[in-house]
Each structure stands twice: as C-alpha cells, then as structure tokens.
Amino acid sequence: MNRLDRPTALKIAAAIIAFLALVELFVYDLPAFMSGAAAVDQIASTGEGPPFAVVIVQTIVSLAALLGAYGTWNGRRWGVALVVMCTVLMLLASIMGTLFAPPQTRIWGVTTIVLEVVILVCCFWRRNKAG
C-alpha cells in the first residue's frame, strides 16, 4: 500500500495555504482596503468585523503565506517554517472569527480551521522508515 510521502504532503500544504491566502486577500482584505480605514473601523465598532489594523496584519500574513507556499512547493525548509508560522496565525484568526463572527461566516471559519489543521499535519509529515 502506498503511503503519502513528504514531498507530496508539502505540495498539498502549499496548495491549501495558497488557496486560503488568496481567498483572504481577494475576498476580505482587498474590499476592506477599497472601502478605507474609517469605514472598516466604523463597521468594527458595531462588532461586525475586525478593526483596520487587524486587516493590515492579516494582509501581511497572507502575503507571507503566499511566499511560504512558494518555498514549500519547492521543498525549502524556510518555506515550511514560514507556512507553519502563517498557518498558526491564520488559525488563531479563524478561531476568533468562528467564535465572534456573525452566524453566516461561521461555516467558513470552521472550514478554514479544518484546512489549517490539514496544512499543519502535512508540514510535519515524515517519511515512512519501513519504505
């Protein structure tokens, strides 16, 4: 029976983190930047979203995750380390989003939590010693 090898696991992790980072950038961050800091902070004051400073941090993490995905896809250690760090930060944001977000966005929060756990498992995947 063939088992998953480390290079394939890293490619899976890279693909998933790239997908999540692109969704974060284009669905959440870019519209927030287009509406401006004042509008985002006004929405945040009602409890419907994060403050603009958090949006900036999320954008930086998403861009770093894309860079890490590139390194991970190519099997570089720095890429895997960057993906792990970004995934942990994204996981914390997903947990907060799931706990405090409006009900219609909680499904996406739970989905991202599951995908981020898969990313971490793939990043720490080791070779089979028997094969």
Image (tube, grey):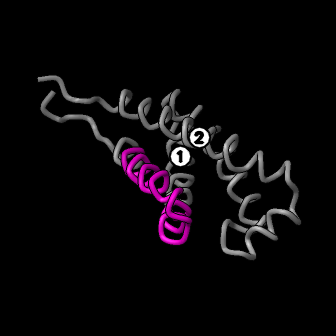
Question: Disc 1 or 2, which lies upstream in sequence?
Answer: 2
- The residue sitting at the top extreme is 2
The crowding category of the residue bearing disc 1, from other C-alpha atoms within 10 Å (few below 14, some 14 to 19, many at least 20), is many
Looking at the image, residue 109 sits to the left or right of residue 33; the answer is left
Residue under the point 20% across and 34% down = 128
Residue under the point 64% across and 38% down = 67
Q: Which residues are magenta?
A: 92-119
Q: Position of residue 117 (x, y in %)?
A: 38, 51
| Quadrant assignment for the C terminus | top left
Residue under the point 73% across and 59% down = 55
Q: Main secondary structure of the magenta part?
A: helix
Corner quadrant of residue 18 = top right
The crowding category of the residue bearing disc 2, from other C-alpha atoms within 10 Å (few below 14, some 14 to 19, many at least 20), is many
Q: Secondary structure at mark 1?
A: helix
Circle 1 is placed at which residue position? Answer: 83
Give the residue type that dot 2 points to.
Gly
Q: Secondary structure at mark 2?
A: helix
Circle 2 is placed at which residue position? Answer: 68
| Quadrant assignment for the N terminus | top left
Callout 1–callout 2 Cβ contact below 8 Å:
yes
Looking at the image, residue 89 sits to the left or right of residue 123; the answer is right
